[in-house]
Image (spheres, rainbow, N blue to C red):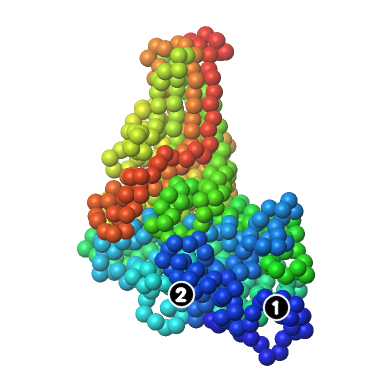
Amino acid sequence: MRPKHRYIVLPVIAFVVLAFAGWRSAEAGREGRYHSSAALAIYRAGGSTDLPVLYSAFFATSGRCAGCHGGDSLGIASVDSTGRDVNVSNDWRSTLMANSARDPFFRAKLEHEVLVNPGHQTAIENKCLSCHAPMGMHEERMLGHPPFTAAMLDTSTIGLDGVSCLACHMQDPDTAGTRFSGDLVFTPDSVWGPYEDDVINSDIMEFFVGFRPGYAEHIIDGRVCAGCHTLITETIDLQGNLTGDEFVEQATWHEWKNSIYAGTEQNCRGCHIPRLQDSIVLASEYVFLPGHSPFGLHHLVGGNAYMVQMLKDNAAALGVKATDVQFDSTIVRSLAILQRSVEVDLVETGRDADTARFQVRLLNQAGHKFPSGYPSRRAIVEFSLLDDQGDTLFVSGRVNEAYEVEGHDPDLEPHHQLITDPAQAQIYELVMGDVNGNVTTVLERAKDPLKDNRLVPAGFSTTHYTYDTTRIAGAAETDPDFNHDAFGVEGDGGDIVHYHVPLNGYAGALQARVRVLFQPVPPRWNQEMFDSTGVRIDAFRNMVDAADGTPDLVAQDSLFSGPVGLAGHGP
């Protein structure tokens, strides 16, 4: 879309144009203001952190938006009450949202899916890119062109801009929250935000960039997230044939709907776009503009610090448009939100000469399952018991030097209510099964969840209308502690794992420790993909080999227990 210079312009617009002569009219003026031809050439070569500046038929890239909503050289706009720069483009550019089309794990997995099912290449790529490169994919769809593919992405500036500004702010308010699996609808002439129409100057933005801003609830209530954070795929058998079955790859939006937070202000935005109550001037270089409150910080993080670190470590190769400092800020925010996700409480419930008994209670503090999103993600409970010399008597869920859980069953590790052996480990995860009921990491082969014991949010109910897309699977379904409180009431969003540890006659003091760990890309998940070879797969394998795969800490607790005969212990 090109900017629409209106024939009739409000007097205030005329004043702005005269007063700020630096704002040159027409296309060449605006493009020259932010990016010279040389700068754009550097960007396209992947050698600059400048954001792309481009109008397409319907969209505009992030660099266009950053012209006003990026950093303000005058220090007036996008600055909070302490003088801190909070501009949205710099907060966004180092996130996985911004880099969704460059994400090396995504690109490798997409290549793997196509290698397994080459006859479905176009359909697979087009579907995946509807959310990972939404402006590129949907532009081709809206123009009536052939499907957007991975080969097209490599030369698509708007596609490589990832989940960019207009991928969210141009979504249609009337259909948001009702269409899923990347089936997004856009309003090409309008963009939407959280401020009422009568408190913003819509004419300025429309004059300069051709999009008229307006107020819409879907930006506030989280519906704008629903279209991509609910993905249902079609099942393909081992011969590459469609079976007519469907698989829920992720249903983060529906998980939130099936929680105590649904319909409240505690929605997606509350955690992922935290609000400042400061009055923030929204656009740079307009000294007369008033501030607006509240202001949404575009942190847009989940708990996946591992992949953000990988983007930072491979920035030049991936062509990302963020600095090390910006990536470091996003990593810190990712770890912070991760460590607010789960509460853990360790309690000793009994001890005799042969056995020490403990229970670990976990409570999900997120508004969706934990972990949520792509099925590779898992949470591990590491429980250890030490003697009075600090030597390990028992450990379950320990991650070894290869970043794999010790004692993990060769196929899948079941959900545990009771753990009595170091070879047992509690892992909260979604495990996909193919048409033969075997474990698979090929998304297009997924038919049923063999296991889904991910911690559900508070208020979650098996009778809720979304349960068909958010269901529990495996042994957790019959675990009386899973999502049930001490009175057996459903919906506490927690789980209790009982540990009965053989002491073999040891009667001394004990120290028990529990850690909850998060691992977004486990080695076990990569095995099937790394059995194949391809440009993207090989590149990702090298990045994984060079990365620190140590799981991130979510929560921890510990306790000391006296020797038998003290503090009520012993026979």
Determine whether the residue tagged by mark 2 lies in a helix, strand or loop: helix
What's under tag 2, amino acid-wise? His
In the rendered view, does 396 fall on the left or right side of 58? Answer: left
* One can see residue 274 in this view: yes
Q: Which mark is residue 138?
A: 2
In the rendered view, does 25 fall on the left or right side of 541? Answer: right
Mark 1 closeness class: few <14, some 14–19, many ≥20 residues within 10 Å:
few
What's under tag 1, amino acid-wise? Ala
* Picture quadrant of residue 116: bottom left
**Where's residue 262, x and y in %?**
61, 57
Q: Earlier in the sequence, mark 1 or mark 2?
A: 1
**Where's residue 464, x and y in %?**
53, 56
Comparing labels 1 and 2, the label whose residue is closer to the camera: 1
Q: Along the line of sight, which residue is nearer the eye, 549 or 384?
A: 549
| The residue positioned farthest toward the bottom in the image shown | 7
Q: Which mark is residue 87?
A: none
In the rendered view, does 7 fall on the left or right side of 113? Answer: right
**Where's residue 180, x and y in %?**
48, 67
Q: Residue at x 58, y 58 (%)?
A: 90
Mark 2 closeness class: few <14, some 14–19, many ≥20 residues within 10 Å:
many
* One can see residue 228 in this view: no
In the rendered view, does 166 fall on the left or right side of 526? Answer: right
Q: Along the line of sight, which residue is nearer the eye, 543 or 164?
A: 543
Residue topped by disc 1: 21
| Number of numbered markers | 2
Q: Residue at x 48, y 47 (%)?
A: 305
Q: Residue at x 29, y 64 (%)?
A: 114
